[in-house]
Image (tube, rainbow, N blue to C red):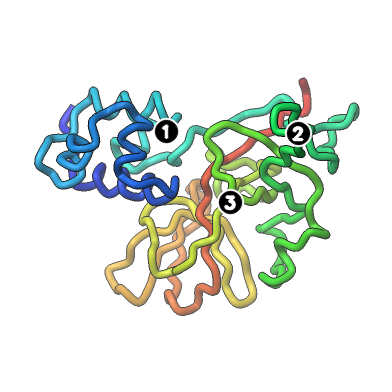
Amino acid sequence: MTYNSNEIIGRLRYIIDEMHMTQNEFAQHIGIDSSNLSKYLNGRLPINESLINRIVVNLGLSKTWLETGEDLPYAKQQLAMPSHTTVDGRISNEPEYDDDDDDYAEGIPVYDIDVTAGMIPRDMMFVNENIIGYINLPNMLQDCRIVRVSGDSMSPVIRSGDMLAVRELSDIQDIFWGQIYVVLLEDYCMVKYVRRHNDPTKVILRSENPDYDDMEIDRDKIRELMFVQNIIHIDTRM
């Protein structure tokens, strides 16, 4: 396979930044020499399949995303039950006790919020009163927050009732094009692919479902962007 090295390097730099690692720490994490990682990132060594496979295996990344930018950075995860559940399958509000740390390992907070149902003021979203439980999953960053989605505009990638692990962007100008975001406008909130527009003052919001048309909006109309890090499907039939 012929790789677009510049695009893959961009995605690698993004992941290193998201993991809050130095290049040396990242190199140790995937098991390569730090000087070679620097050469890969600076284009002095060509990206090859061996490196791709090493990163995918060690980080649990989506190979499709790393190679092409399609899909999500981490594969869609499916649970028979949430990590903390009651006997009737509801997410528990009691955190899990960690014997090793002699402390509570709460995991990622789950909020009683549907980010596609109406418009919730940003300052009312992630308050403690909205936390209904916690989930522990591999490859999920600790600064994520988990919310619900409804509707079929992103089906079949995201189904109505799925949950999303999202991360807020500190600067909404730093858009990773072609990825899925929760987009908060003045009076509306939606989950879409954010695509580059020919006019740099605008963006294209695209659905997965072909029954929905693209939307073109002014970038300055966006109040908040939340990157969709993981999609979680909870199968309550099991």
Name the residue rendered at 29%, 35% in the picture: 67
Name the residue rendered at 38%, 73% in the picture: 202
Q: Determine the CA span between mark 1 and mark 3.
A: 18 Å
**Quadrant placement of the N terminus:** top left
Of the residues shown, which amino acid type is indicated by label 1? Leu
Which mark is first along the chain, 3 or 2? 2
Write down the residue under mark 1.
61
Lateral position of residue 90 relative to residue 154, left or right? right
Q: Position of residue 165 (x, y in %)?
A: 60, 46
Lateral position of residue 238 relative to residue 145, left or right? right
Note whether residue 82 is visible. no
Of the residues shown, which amino acid type is indicated by label 3? Asp
Which mark is first along the chain, 1 or 2? 1
Of the residues shown, which amino acid type is indicated by label 2? Asp
Q: Is residue 157 above or below residue 177?
A: above
**Closest to the observer, 234 or 135:** 135
Note whether residue 8 is visible. yes
Q: Residues within 10 Å of mark 2 (few under 14, many from 20)?
A: few
Name the residue rendered at 78%, 24% in the picture: 237
Q: Determine the CA span between mark 2 and mark 3.
A: 22 Å
